Amino acid sequence: MFVHSDLQSTAIREGEAHDSSRRGREAGLKHGFEEGYLRGRAKAIVEAAPIHFPKRALKVLYVSSGKGFPYAPIDEAIIATLQTLAAEVSVAGPKQPVSELASSSLPDLMLVLDGMELPVEQVDAVRAKGIRTAIWLTDDPYYTDITIRTAPHYDYVFTLERNCLDFYRSAGCNNVHYLPFAAHVGHYRPTLTRSPVRRAISFIGSAYWNRIEFLQPIIGGLMEKGLTINGIWWDRLPEYASYPDRIEIGKWMGPGETAEVYSGSKIVLNMHRSPYDTTVNNNSVGLTAASPNPRTFEISACGTLQLADVRDDLASFYVPGQEIETFSNPSELYDKVNFYLDHETERREIALRALERTYREHTYSHRLHEMLSRIFS
């Protein structure tokens, strides 16, 4: 009787092991198929015939932000794109004598990114030569106490924040245009083969206080679901010590590494910073923020599902529920994370629609073509 029972137990264990192995194989095959299908469709979107904009017979002097990382990748994106749209592009830093450079090269346009490091006297001197000047402001509305003093020195002001248009017009700027940043597809694109990065949920960004306060009620649950965070200041989070292997602090990730993480994540969170945080902002008039940040376009360009906090103008760029998902409070974010981790098809289709929309409408080629059209129409 003892021997029979022992044999029976062994048979049961072997059967359970076989069932477990079978379920593992089936899950692996299902996951492999789903990832292959996602990568294959993303490849088709990326390799579809791109939109080509005309190259204009223009000479452009581009003045970089001069701030280094994380502005440097934006400088790279703009320079690379301008070279496809203008006949001649020269580049200078804000500490160089740009008025002298303009005198020698006589560009049709001097385009400045950010402009905080460039003395306005240099801008005035370039304008005095009859050369058009334009500035693309990078951080509206967060530093408007500073930009309100520099913007009136330019012929054209381009802001990535819709709510800043009237603000600059009231300061005497005659040509103010809304022009958000975009995705530079040379930096941000989906991994088209099996991704070396495997994450459930990712957030890459700085630990502004509004982000800390928002995440605290659900941080434990998100960590259980597989959240990984990269960025500075996250030791502000009271629970940081409990997740040292899931929160990497003190590191700026370059665009290539960031894109790889985005593409290798099932869900990427996007939480905008607050325009009212006096510890980091210079926005004494209290301008609100309605427009999406650059990360919105960069995540979408990587073929992954984005969960973004609601901003009034977000729907002008991506259709909520179809090309992007949004949340208004911590419990809504947590519920949507749970839903999309369990619904692969819905998650994949939103991600692919966002990828297609980005390549169709939201690249730096689209933005800079629009800028040049407004200036040289």
Image: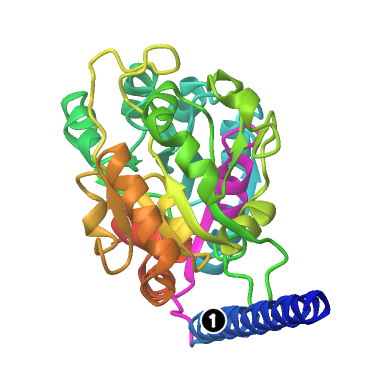
Say if 347 sits above or below 223 in the image: below
Task: Depth check: give the residue in front, 195 or 86.
Answer: 195
Residue at x 37%, y 25% (from the top left corner)? 142
Tag 1 secondary structure? helix
- Where's residue 1, x and y in %? 77, 78
Q: Is residue 31 visible?
A: yes
* Three-letter residue code for mark 1: Glu
In which quarter of the view is residue 191 placed?
Answer: bottom right
Say if 172 sits above or below 315 in the image: above
**Left or right: 2 as drawn, with respect to 89:** right
Task: Depth check: give the residue in front, 344 or 184.
Answer: 344
Colouring method of the image: rainbow
Say if 276 sits above or below 9 in the image: above
The residue segment tinted magenta is 49-78
Task: Depth check: give the residue in front, 148 or 372.
Answer: 148
Magenta span has 76?
yes
Magenta span has 127?
no
Extreme-front residue of the structure = 1
**Left or right: 198 as drawn, with respect to 278:** right
- Where's residue 193, x and y in %? 68, 78
Quadrant the C terminus occupies: bottom left
Q: Crowdedness of circle 1 by 10 Å Cα count: few (<14), some, many (20+)?
A: some
Residue at x 55%, y 24% (from the top left corner)? 239
Q: Is residue 111 visible?
A: no
Residue at x 55%, y 65% (from the top left corner)? 185
Task: Depth check: give the residue in front, 198 or 208.
Answer: 198
Extreme-right residue of the structure = 3
Residue at x 45%, y 17% (from the top left corner)? 280
- Where's residue 346, x and y in %? 36, 73
Say if 156 sits above or below 84 in the image: above
- Where's residue 106, x and y in %? 54, 47
Give the labeled residue for mark 1. Answer: 34
